[in-house]
Amino acid sequence: MNLNPRDQVMEAVRSNLPSEKVAYPETPAFAKTITVMLPAFEERIREAGATLYKPASLAAAQALLEEQYGDASVICSATPDLKGNLDIHSIKNPHDLADVDVGIIRARFGVAENGMVWLTQEDLVVNSLGFLSQHLVILLQPTELVADMYDAYMRVFLDDTAYGCFMMGPSATADIGAVLVHGAQGARSLSVYLV
């Protein structure tokens, strides 16, 4: 027997598995406490320090973006729905996004119980856009809300993407003197455009 240490451990585990097969426990059907999702999502978004907008169309969203961030030097959009002035597909090094004032990303779905949104590598295009931008604008279809994390995990397919994360509100910390500071390790503000 010429096994390396990893193979030895795995072989020991395999040889000591119980012979009796036991079924996984069933996941109970938890009662839903949130039945109307948008008001709950709005409330959680605000509690997390983010701002929610309801532009009537993508054109209205573009106008809102320009009104909110008219003085921004670098706006980078990872979605064709809103335009920026930096083409994310031209980025070769994630560090090149360090000077982005506003990053725009379309989320897959939102979670009503906590105000989080699910983003994948495909949504971010370059992952650092979600973490180096000074301000984030998240686009979200109002119909793409789930009640809770039980429903959210049913929509997460990690086999389909190399990376994904739940994001909620702007970066925040209150480590020093219990004073809340936004933007300590990430975006200083987060706006959700329901469109």
Image: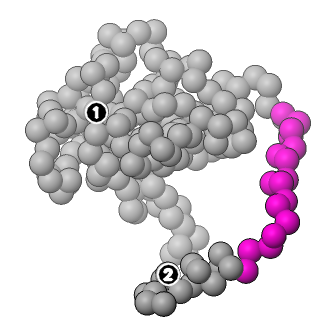
Range of the magenta residues? 16-32
Task: Return the disc, 1 or 2, that comes first in the chain's sequence.
Answer: 2
- Judge from the rendering whether residue 92 lies leftward or rightward of residue 84; answer left or right: left
Disc 1 versus disc 2: distance between alpha carbons? 43 Å
Q: Is the magenta stretch mostly helix, strand or loop?
A: loop
Q: Which amino acid does label 2 sit on?
A: Asp
Q: How many marks?
A: 2
Q: In this rendering, does residue 183 appear at all? A: yes
Name the residue carrying label 1: 78
Image location of residue 26, percent across then percent down: 85, 47
Looking at the rendered structure, the secondary structure element under dot 1 is loop
Name the residue carrying label 2: 7
Residue 40 location, quadrant: top right
Q: Residue 102 carries which label?
A: none
Q: Hey, which residue is sitting farthest front in the picture?
A: 1
Q: Which of 16 and 178 is in front in this view?
A: 16
- The residue lying at 72 percent from left, 42 percent from top is 150
Residue 21 location, quadrant: bottom right
- The residue lying at 49 percent from left, 31 percent from top is 108
Residue 63 location, quadrant: top left
- Judge from the rendering whether residue 195 lies leftward or rightward of residue 64; answer left or right: right
In the image, residue 78 lies in the stretch drawn in magenta: no
Q: Which amino acid does label 1 sit on?
A: Ala
Image location of residue 154, percent across then percent down: 65, 37
- The residue lying at 39 percent from left, 62 percent from top is 185
Q: Which of 62 and 11 is in front in this view?
A: 11
- Judge from the rendering whether residue 42 lies leftward or rightward of residue 164; answer left or right: right
Image location of residue 129, percent across then percent down: 29, 46
Residue 165 vs 4, above or below: the answer is: above
